[in-house]
Image: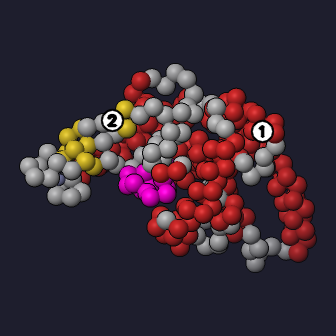
Amino acid sequence: MAAGNRSGLITEAGGEEEAPSESLTEASEGAFLLVAQDEEDFFMYQTLLAEASFFLFLLQCDGEVAEEARQRGCLACGGVLHRADYERRPRGEPRGLGAGFARRYSFCCGAEGCRKRNTPPSLRFLGRRVYLGAVVVLVSAMREGPTPTRLDRLQELIGVCPRTVRRWRQWWQATFPRTAVWVATRGLLSRQVEETRLPGSLLDRLLGTVRERVVALLRLISPLTSRPLPADRNI
Ligand SMILES: [Zn+2]
């Protein structure tokens, strides 16, 4: 309980238990940490993007989400769902993930007269974007402190060009805040998240290791991945 409160105070900043002297110490340490953290985040995000185990974990999550969808049945009529995956050609993942990684889990309803396609949410694929969701999240978050060196490194690591990154950031800051997913999420947060700094500001707000926070964010936005978005077209 005490530990929970303590971390709650740090996250929510300005807790009433703070003594004035503690506040001063925390403020100066905080300023230092912010500068250091920007650099640290960049390297942690970069490391995560190269981790096969991270992407395989997302594949496993997608498998679980798909199994839940299968058990639930057709969203339109409740009919039995049959597997009807389709192949994607994603970009941005590390090598050696295996052929199964590119398979987008999907189902078709078996009921006569319905036959609707049911595509469950995904933590790997973000709508119709060619780049994987984790790449779109992490690279967009990195671009908060862009330097030519960083952009070069990103291009080398995942082959993404600065123009694409700019489009992603426009989506995060202009389109994403208008989605029902974000409106609902924002309502659950105790403090406002700076929308001009999305998705980095949301990643900062979540708890856990970088990997856990990215997974949480991908899970949070995953409802966006199972239905077409008008603004998806240009991304
Ligand atoms: Zn159906």
The magenta-colored residue range is: 218-232
What coloring was used for the rendering? secondary structure
Q: Which residue is drawn at 54% across and 33% down?
A: 91
Q: 42 left or right of 160?
A: right
* SS class, disc 2: strand
Task: Say which residue appears at 74% left-offset and 42% top-offset.
Answer: 42
Give the side of residue 105 with respect to residue 194, left or right.
Answer: left
Q: Which x, y percent locates residue 235?
A: 54, 49
Q: Can residue 80 be seen in this view?
A: no
What residue is at 34 percent from the left and 49 percent from the top? 120
- Mark 2 lies within 8 Å of ligand 1 (Cβ measured): no
Would residue 234 be visible to someone looking at this image? yes
What residue would you read off at disc 2? Answer: 86
Q: How far apart are marks 1 and 2 (CA)?
A: 34 Å
> Residue 224 at x, y = what percent?
44, 56
Left or right, residue 28 beside residue 166: right
* Residue 67: image location, x then y, percent: 30, 43
Residue lying furthest left = 112
Image quadrant in which you'd find residue 106: top left
Circle 2 packing at 10 Å, graded few (<14), some (14-19), many (20+), is few
At 56% from the left edge and 69% from the top edge, which residue is drawn? 186
Q: Which amino acid does label 2 sit on?
A: Tyr
Image coords of residue 115 (percent x, y): 16, 48
Q: Compare marks 1 and 2 and give the one earlier in the sequence.
A: 2
Can you say whether 195 is above or below 71 in the image?
Answer: below
Q: Does the magenta stretch include residue 175?
A: no
Magenta span dominant secondary structure: helix
Numbered badge on residue 150: 1
In magenta stretch: residue 225? yes
